[in-house]
Amino acid sequence: MDLKELKKIITIFQKAKIAELEVESKDGVRFKLKKEVKERQTPPRKETPIEVITVPVQSSEQKAQPAPEVKPKENMHEIVSPMIGTFYTAPAPDVPPFVEVGQEIKEDDSVCIIEAMKIMNEIKAEVKGKIVKVLAENGKPVQFGQPLFLVELSPK
Amino acid sequence: MFSKVLVANRGEIAIRVIRTLREMGIRTVAVYSQADKDSLHTKLASESICIGSAAASESYLNMAAIISAAEITNVEAIHPGYGFLAENAHFADVCSSCNISFIGPSAEAIRLMGDKVQARKIMKKAGVPTIPGSDDVVNNKDEALKIARRIGYPVIIKAAKGGGGKGMRIAYNDGKLVSLFIACQREVEVAFGDASLYIEKYMPGSRHIEVQVLADKRGNMLTLGERDCSIQRRYQKLLEESPSPVVGNKERKKLFKYAAEAVKAINYTNAGTIEFLMDKGGRFYFMEMNTRLQVEHPVTEVVYSIDIVKEQVRIASGELIRYSSNSVQPKGWAIECRINAEDVQADFLPSPGKITELRLPGGPFVRVDTHIYDGYNTPPYYDSLLAKVIAWGRGRNEAMARMRRALDEFNIEGIKTTIPFHKQLISHPLFIKGDDYSELLDKILVRQKKVTGL
């Protein structure tokens, strides 16, 4: 069994409504796949973590291949508000916003403005990654600690 | 009248203020630090908003955050409670420039009385007797020595911009005065940003007697009796009562006259308290004025049946005091015990933590102002006050008996509290006698040491 075949099996397993699958290939590789299946008939999302239990194999030459890692939640980061104020996505009205969904950002980039007592405070990203979602509403108040952006962090 | 008010405080006082605002039909906004997100005051307000991280400097002392919260929630006024920004003249100014009413006196009155040296000067000029001491700021140790020799030892060195008992040192002779003076300057500079000191005669055994006043914007004024707050540890009040057991009727009349003169001298508005010392001869001396609502205000409220916070809000919104001095008469006697999360055996070390069991006192004529609840985790970032228990009686004996009963019912498990200490206090013969408290605390603490062998 090669990696391509393994990936295929895993993809099929992800989409199927099975909770557990044990596979033994012709060349002696054995492995088990496990996942949670919800009652509802919705297809499993890509992010559903899949436990891969690899079983050691007789032949020393054929090492069990670890499954490709399903995207875990650890590299998702929320930029939260460091202060209370009003959230603005752009430096000024009628001007494009600081960042947009899909945009790559670096630590020093300004991502938004939080206005308090007529002072416009530019908020820095402080992380490196990609904007996945804007979590606060433009022109609306935000509290201290309120999530503003969802960022997918760049690998280190 | 305001339709929406923000309460810039936390704990028991935030709840107390929110309660009155709700009774008046005013919408309320609670602010909280991240450490206070499970705090009771946030649950009792119409809206609550997180303004910063745990440290007071980032949250409850953070003017920009509080004003920002006020603007976002569109409030018309801010009640500052006590402590934090309540006596910050700059904050009162900022509120004013943002068109938000500050529920309290004017920034000018706060500024004037916040400078204790200025306050003494003003009172002296108004004919109110002040504690013998320096006429102005004492600039160096030579001036200090001259003043001490004039008024006689012992003397107490105080910070001009001070308060809360911080930076106060007692000197018994020239040598001590010189070294303490220099140490004080340093301490006070750090604590208040201003090294100005003044000196007063130290009068051990005097009673701390304060007068509650209310004044509206037209100059109408009410004196709501006196409170005796003589039982203190390191300048922190432990127990207060109204009226004072050592003030006779003749003295009381004089006392109220001085208080009225103080209010007039600075055109004071809203609620305030003028603090006096009463010496063994029954003479009163102005000490300082607190331009805010005080912790122990409930004692006055239950004796006068007046909601002081309600009057604060009314006065701030431009309404006039609707009581005449004759119609306002005290009735009965009230005692308040301040219960703290402190370990008495460990020199009153703060003892924050989770309250695993709680039984609050109640019943006739017992009032409890508190923010604690069963399962509450007391945060370590703020003061250690857990609850105020106030007991009213037709006379002092009944008030004491009622307090004894209330404290017996009061149970807090999971953290160390000063409930046992207060139980001893309220039953001690020296407290019951009431005329001389100079040995009271020592006697109770010595007894504790004997019992625990510490």
Image (cartoon, rainbow, N blue to C red):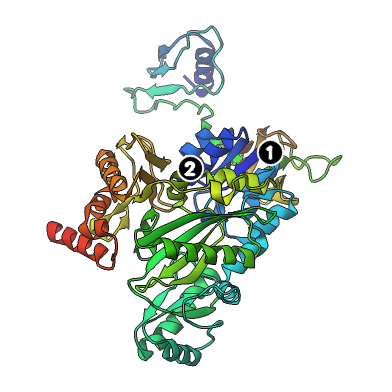
Q: Which chain does tag 2 point to?
A: B
Give the image location of residue B69, x and y in percent.
65, 44
Label ID, residue B53: none
Q: Secondary structure at mark 2?
A: loop
Q: Which chain does tag 1 point to?
A: A
Give the image location of residue B454, x and y in percent.
16, 62
Q: Is residue B311 left or right of residue B12?
A: right
Q: Is residue B327 left or right of residue B207?
A: right
Q: Is residue B349 left or right of residue B309?
A: left
Q: CA distance from mark 1 to mark 2?
A: 41 Å
Amino acid identity at mark 2: Ser
- The relative height of residue B4 versus residue A31 in the rendered view (above or below) is below
Q: Secondary structure at mark 1?
A: strand
Give the foreground label among 1 and 2. 2
In which quadrant of the rendered view does residue A142 lie? Answer: top right
> Looking at the figure, which quarter contains the C terminus of chain A?
top right
- The relative height of residue B284 versus residue B445 in the rendered view (above or below) is below
Front residue (pair A1, B134):
B134
| Residue that mark 1 sits on | A141
In which quadrant of the rendered view does residue B265 lie? Answer: bottom right
Q: Does the rendering let one see residue A21?
A: yes
Amino acid identity at mark 1: Pro
Picture residue at 44% right of the left edge, 52% below the top: B296
Front residue (pair A116, B48):
B48
- The relative height of residue B128 versus residue B351 in the rendered view (above or below) is below
Picture residue at 29% right of the left edge, 64% below the top: B435
| Residue that mark 2 sits on | B305
